[in-house]
Image: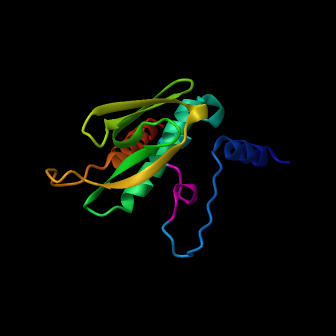
Amino acid sequence: MAVDDKAELTSQKDEPCGRAVHADPDARPTPEQEPLPKGISRKPQGDKSAAEWAWERLILYIRNFEAQLDQEHEIAIGVTDSGAGLLRIEGMGYFDPDIVTFYGIDPSGARSQLIQHVTQLNVALRAIAKPGSQPEPRRIGFRLAEELEDAGKDD
């Protein structure tokens, strides 16, 4: 095997691997099918904590889900197995090596924060009606994705 071939194999191993198949051949591409933002691929996989990997991939899923919403809906998470119910996402973060956090508001309007260990991470993305007093839906996924793109500009 040539040196260049080894370098290419190494770089491929450093990139996350994902795949998705849909019944509808014209379905919108999913995060597994789209190129990674530079901010995700800037650091070798082995140099990232489980929390950072989970955070980056969640951003891609949230951005993709929001791109499919109309102007009357926003994204929320339905937290499984925690009893927390729905949470309108206003922010998301991680704390190395293993914590992912979601910041937002529950259906009653109470400020909420969900803190999860990556081994317990199990989130359902949901479309919910935006508040009637709010003229435009808030799109957290695109702000989060900008963070990834900005991180990749240093390369």
Residue 25 forms part of the magenta stretch: no
Work out whether residue 30 or residue 10 is closer to the camera in this orientation and state it: 30
Left or right placement of residue 56 versus residue 2 in this view: left
* Residue lying at 42% horizontally and 36% vertically, measured from the top left: 84
* Residue lying at 37% horizontally and 47% vertically, measured from the top left: 76
* Residue lying at 57% horizontally and 75% vertically, measured from the top left: 25
The furthest residue to the bottom: 25
Work out whether residue 63 or residue 125 is closer to the camera in this orientation and state it: 125
Rendered location of residue 111, percent (x, y): 28, 32
Rendered location of residue 43, percent (x, y): 57, 35
Rendered location of residue 19, percent (x, y): 64, 57
Rendered location of residue 131, percent (x, y): 21, 51
**Splitting the image into 4 quarters, where does residue 119 fall?**
top right
Left or right placement of residue 81 versus residue 64 in this view: right
Q: Write the start and end of the magenta stretch as one range.
A: 29-36
- Relative to residue 68, is residue 38 depicted above or below? above
